[in-house]
Image: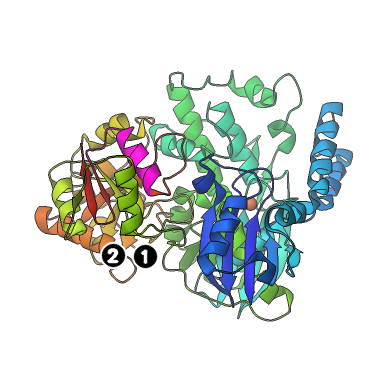
């Protein structure tokens, strides 16, 4: 049985994946191929890449499953919210809603663009509720048989937060908190207020938070509640002179993007992050109580909040946590693709996801062709891992392009920029020369799994850089470039059998320096998607201050 999973909500992060008999073989976000960040268009390129990978014509697909319901679902919900008063009513708002519905309806929820681009197919089209798709994307890949499953995002079609109980391949729906009572909405509106892009730059608020101090009370916006949270949507969605008018009337004017960050901005970031953590802890506690399990799976965009995830784990509320590495909407296709197993009443196929290398790869022959096309002199390397380690130990900033691309927002040693974490100046060097991003944002380390406990307090498996933990006090001066101002870090633990080449690079670096840890950030420039092809990597390398590029079996130096 061949099943294609698609995320296409027209809002952001379109993607596709393909599975044979319940085993996902390939997944990629449209943005990586189209080079348009958060691309929301119908994922034609991603679907084509899926079909090419398995060598199956579109006509032979058994299922095409979208992680988004047919348009009427969300239209009915939003109209009801307007009638009930949880959404402000305005002629412009109603017009916008109806226009969006008409557009989605004309596309038959995505069936029409599929047939237009790929021709007729015998496939059965399924439109899967968004939170169900997220829930499957967490539970079915967690390796847990019995687990609570929390989905927390900005909004689904109509959902904001939902709780499920996964048992022996089945998912029981417990409850859903409907949008706009949304933790993601709360976080996004304050991200906007702080001068960053909502539903995209929440990372920046999370990174800024440790520079602030407690003091600002946001209880009016996110009401402490035993429900377990209550977002004041009427204050968060205002249709007055500015969408953020209610926030501005209480906290002063919105920060102008790129302007100076004052102490009050930092204190507000602290309050936003802390409120979110408290709400997520409360959700985790309720989830554990209501399912009677000590395992927790998380998905939905808010589950990318690694700080909150780490706090849940260290709180002792649960014993184990699995966060789908593609917890945002791109990853919802991983759930949709398995829906036919669920929908037929059978059990979901359960796997333990140990890596996220589900994307395209380039052979050395393809890389060589790209290098020749751009007339770039390259050296063939007998041992890319050893050479890369040597360069890193000498203080060089490296582009590292190897194997299959990661699915999800984190680079995990497939499409990474690497540097020496021992150099206290390295954060500034990489920020200024390569990432061109805000100086206060932290970088993360990749550490050999077997050495993680030497560096990280309460070290746990963290293969996806999605849990924040504390660096051991005595090691903070050893790896200053990946230790945040509050002593925290967001580690990737690298296991030998999962990524042997990357493991060996870190191991070789450790042999030379005594520190089996490298600084790892995604291979992209500010505002661009992570590189996918050799051409993307070469262009990014020469557009930045990176010193060397190790691409497949080749070394390019400036
Ligand atoms: Fe979502």
Residue 228 can be seen, yes or no:
yes
- The local secondary structure at tag 2 comes to helix
Q: Within 8 Å: ligand 1 and the Cβ of disc 2?
A: no
Q: Residue 541: within the magenta?
A: yes
Residue sitting farthest toward the right:
83
Q: Nearer the viewer, residue 234 or 377?
A: 377
Give the quadrant of the C terminus: top left
Q: Is residue 491 above or below residue 425?
A: below
In this rendering, position of residue 192 left or right of residue 74: left
Q: Is residue 100 above or below residue 386?
A: above
In this rendering, position of residue 515 left or right of residue 301: left
Q: Nearer the viewer, residue 239 or 136?
A: 136
Q: Residue 194: within the magenta?
A: no
Residue 83 picture location, percent across and down: 89, 40
x 46%, y 34%: residue: 527
x 74%, y 65%: residue: 126
Q: Which mark is residue 461?
A: 1
Residue sitting farthest toward the left:
512
x 67%, y 43%: residue: 11
Q: Main secondary structure of the magenta part?
A: helix
Q: Quadrant of residue 462?
A: bottom left
Marked residue nearer the N-terminal end (1 or 2): 2
Residue 347 picture location, percent across and down: 65, 80
Q: Quadrant of residue 242?
A: top right
Residue bounds of the magenta highlight: 534-548
x 53%, y 66%: residue: 296
Query: Gap between marks 1 and 2, in whole Å?
Result: 7 Å
Which residue bears the numbered disc 2? 449
Q: State yes or no: discs 1 and 2 in contact (Cβ < 8 Å).
A: yes
Disc 1 residue crowd, few under 14, some 14–19, many 20+, Cα 10 Å: some
In this rendering, position of residue 2 left or right of residue 90: left
């Amino acid at each position: 049985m061949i099943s294609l999973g698609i995320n296409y909500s027209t809002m952001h992060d379109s993607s596709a994946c393909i599975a044979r008999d319940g085993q996902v073989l390939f997944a990629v976000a449209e943005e990586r191929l189209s080079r348009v960040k958060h691309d929301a268009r119908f994922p034609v390129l991603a679907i084509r890449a899926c079909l090419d990978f398995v060598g199956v014509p579109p006509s032979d697909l058994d299922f095409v499953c979208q992680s988004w319901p047919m348009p009427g679902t969300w239209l009915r919900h939003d109209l009801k919210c307007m009638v009930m008063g949880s959404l402000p009513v305005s002629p412009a708002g109603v017009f916008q809603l109806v226009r969006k519905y008409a557009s989605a309806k004309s596309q038959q929820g995505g069936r029409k663009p599929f047939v237009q681009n790929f021709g007729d197919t015998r496939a059965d089209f399924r439109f899967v509720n968004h939170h169900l798709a997220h829930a499957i994307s967490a539970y079915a890949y967690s390796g847990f048989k019995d687990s609570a499953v929390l989905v927390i995002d900005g909004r689904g079609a109509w959902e904001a937060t939902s709780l499920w109980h996964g048992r022996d391949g089945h998912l029981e729906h417990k409850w859903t908190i409907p949008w706009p009572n949304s933790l993601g909405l709360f976080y996004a509106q304050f991200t906007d207020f702080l001068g960053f892009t909502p539903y995209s730059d929440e990372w920046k608020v999370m990174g800024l938070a440790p520079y602030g101090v407690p003091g600002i009370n946001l209880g009016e916006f996110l009401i402490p509640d035993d429900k377990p949270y209550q977002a004041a949507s009427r204050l968060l969605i205002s249709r007055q002179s500015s969408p953020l008018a209610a926030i501005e009337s209480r906290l002063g004017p919105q920060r102008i993007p790129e302007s100076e960050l004052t102490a009050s901005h930092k204190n507000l970031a602290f309050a936003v992050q802390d409120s979110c953590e408290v709400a997520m802890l409360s959700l985790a506690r309720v989830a554990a109580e209501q399912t009677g399990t000590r395992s927790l799976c998380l998905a939905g965009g808010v589950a990318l909040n690694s700080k909150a995830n780490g706090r849940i784990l260290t709180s002792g509320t649960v014993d184990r946590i699995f966060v789908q590495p593609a917890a945002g909407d791109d990853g919802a296709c991983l759930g949709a693709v398995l829906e036919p197993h669920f929908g037929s009443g059978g059990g979901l196929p359960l796997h333990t996801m140990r890596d996220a290398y589900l994307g395209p790869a380039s052979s050395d022959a393809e890389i060589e062709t790209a290098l020749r096309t751009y007339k770039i002199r390259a050296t063939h390397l007998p041992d890319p891992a050893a050479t890369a380690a040597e360069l890193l130990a000498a203080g060089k900033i490296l582009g590292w392009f190897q194997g299959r691309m990661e699915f999800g927002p984190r680079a995990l040693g497939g499409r990474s920029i690497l540097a020496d974490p021992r150099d206290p100046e390295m954060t500034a060097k990489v920020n200024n020369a390569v990432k061109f991003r805000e100086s206060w944002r932290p970088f993360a380390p990749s550490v050999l799994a077997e050495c993680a406990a030497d560096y990280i307090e309460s070290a746990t498996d963290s293969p996806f850089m999605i849990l924040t933990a504390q660096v051991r006090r005595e090691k903070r001066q050893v790896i200053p470039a990946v230790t945040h101002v509050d002593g925290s870090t967001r580690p990737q633990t690298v296991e030998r059998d999962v990524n042997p080449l990357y493991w060996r690079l870190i191991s070789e670096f450790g042999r030379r320096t005594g520190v089996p840890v490298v600084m790892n950030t995604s291979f992209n420039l500010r505002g661009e998607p992570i590189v996918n092809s050799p051409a993307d990597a070469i262009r990014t390398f020469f557009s930045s201050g990176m010193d060397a590029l190790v691409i497949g079996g080749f070394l390019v130096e400036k």
